[in-house]
Image (cartoon, grey):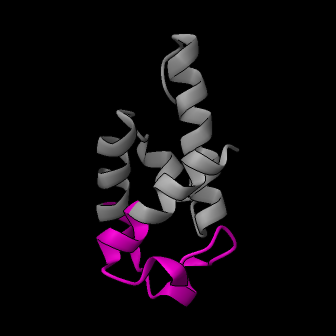
């Protein structure tokens, strides 16, 4: 995972949840950040806009941490760069 991509994800999470950026790390769990399922949906919409990707609904249900979210974004970006449909 690139540092730039991780920082972009952290910024989207902090901005969407309106919490200080320094409180969000790659190892943060959503529960510890006070992120519930509605917050997660809002964050995912923001990430789709930030990275110009489409996040499949089934992926959303498995994401529980910032690291999970970064890994998912990385996978979708790789698929997009390869020209494959997202989620494959």
Q: Is the magenta stretch mostly helix, strand or loop?
A: helix
Up the image or down, 12 lies above or below 22; here it is above
- Any magenta on residue 58? no
Q: Going by the image, does 12 lie left or right of 33?
A: left
Up the image or down, 31 lies above or below 15; here it is below
Q: Is residue 17 visible?
A: yes
Q: Which residue is drawn at 41% across and 47% down?
A: 57
Tell me where residue 43 sits by quadrant.
bottom left
What is the number of callouts on the image?
A: 0
Quadrant where the C terminus lies?
A: top right
**Which one is in front, 85 or 11?**
11
Tell me where residue 82 sits by quadrant.
top right
Give coordinates of residue 25: x percent, y percent: 62, 73
**Which one is in front, 47 or 55?**
47
Q: What stretch is highlighted in magenta?
A: 12-41
Give coordinates of residue 27: x percent, y percent: 69, 73
Give coordinates of residue 60: x percent, y percent: 47, 55
Q: Residue at x 64, y 58 (%)?
A: 68
Quadrant where the N terminus lies?
A: top right
Up the image or down, 18 lies above or below 11; here it is below
**Which one is in front, 87 or 49?**
49
Q: Residue at x 35, y 33 (%)?
A: 52
Give coordinates of residue 45: x percent, y percent: 30, 52
Q: Going by the image, does 68 lie left or right of 46?
A: right
Q: Residue at x 53, y 84 (%)?
A: 23
- Any magenta on residue 26? yes
Tell me where residue 2 sits by quadrant.
top right
Q: Is residue 38 visible?
A: no
């Amino acid at each position: 995972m690139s540092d730039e991509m991780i920082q972009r994800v952290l910024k989207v999470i902090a901005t969407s949840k309106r919490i200080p950026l320094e409180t969000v790390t790659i190892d943060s769990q959503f529960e510890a950040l006070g992120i519930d399922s509605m917050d997660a949906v809002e964050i995912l919409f923001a990430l789709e806009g930030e990275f110009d990707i489409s996040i499949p609904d089934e992926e959303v249900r498995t994401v529980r941490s910032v690291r999970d979210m970064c890994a998912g974004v990385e996978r979708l970006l790789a698929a997009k760069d390869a020209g494959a449909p997202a989620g494959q």
